Amino acid sequence: MKQAIMVAPGEIQIRQVSAPSAQAGEVLLRIRRIGVCGSDIHVYHGKHPYTSYPVVQGHEFSATVESVAEGATGIGPGMKVTAMPQITCGTCPPCRRGDWHICDKLRVWGFQAPGVAQELFAAPASSIVPLPETFSLEQGALVEPAAVAAHAVSRAPNLAGRNVAVLGAGPIGNLVAQAARAQGAGVLITDLSEHRLEIARRCGLTQTSNPATETLDAAAGRFFGDAGFQCAFECVGVEATITAAIQAIRKGGTIVVVGVFGQKPRVDLGLVQDRELNVRGTLMYRRDDYERAIELIASGAIATAPLESMHFPLEQYKAGYEFIDAQRDKIMKVFIDL
């Protein structure tokens, strides 16, 4: 079978390797679509601190079940599925209290463990998440980032009737904003890219602002009046956006840090203390977040079609990365087709 392997930053080889078989408790998957995410791009550029080479990438995907081994129940050949890509120890304190998604020894497919960038992939039956037959392969591959959004929204207080600012309108920021809207929040989304703001509007997120021409405080006043916003989701991972959130949010508000910070930011903790702000992290997801993501996509509460930018076959995996580098903020989600 064909497999794409990144042997060094910026160098991807397509190899012929032996196909895996499902062992006891496993399911053999035929991979159909792989979504390229921001973390994958960090690996491509050699800037992911927790990934070594060579590495087989791919962690957000859709597949069909090829075969099922003994001990894998409730799953049958031909089913349309995705899977949770975490490998956990089950014995550390977070795992023992049920927070296995922040396992002390967490490994993730495509980073610290081989991912799905190959024609066939054997996965534990416990990781499999069935998809509605009505889902497109692209929707199936978008369940993983939508689950990131669902979990991030769950880290905030009840959002119904509250005003929310989402800083960053890339794929994750867009999905976070849509998930917050589905919870009944009023949502303002900001980005320096007019293209991404237009995509947000196509997803029904009509309250948009560009920080190049308008401060977050001014945008909040324009949309929310004196009430401002009580919750913010930082989805960029840079000092400027976390600073803007801290400065503009209402006293007692909650800031959820979704973006991955490549450089350590300097933040005004005096302001955090004085305004009694709550700053919370969020990492990945749990099974209920996957189920919530599927529910939101199936109901139409999360629109996915505007996020689909371009497709490349497995043989042109590197071309997909080159396209992302060339287009930068003019694309949203690139898919690898198998």
Image (cartoon, grey):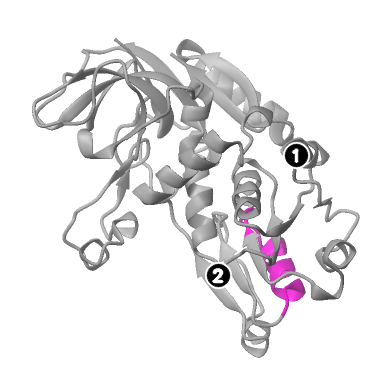
User: The disc labelled 2 sits on which kind of residue?
Assistant: Pro
Toward the bottom, the furthest residue is: 274
Between the C-alphas of marks 2 and 1, the distance is 27 Å
User: The disc labelled 1 sits on which kind of residue?
Assistant: Arg
> In this picture, is 182 found above or below 217?
above
> In this picture, is 131 found above or below 179?
above
Front: mark 2 or 1: 2
Label 2 Cα crowd, 10 Å radius (few <14 / some 14-19 / many 20+): few
For the magenta stretch, what is the residue range? 234-250
Q: Name the residue rendered at 30%, 15% in the picture.
A: 78
The image's mark for residue 145 is none
- Residue 209: x %, y % from top left: 83, 53
Q: Name the residue rendered at 61%, 32% in the picture.
A: 304
| Residue under numbered circle 1 | 196
| Residue under numbered circle 2 | 157
- Residue 301: x %, y % from top left: 61, 41
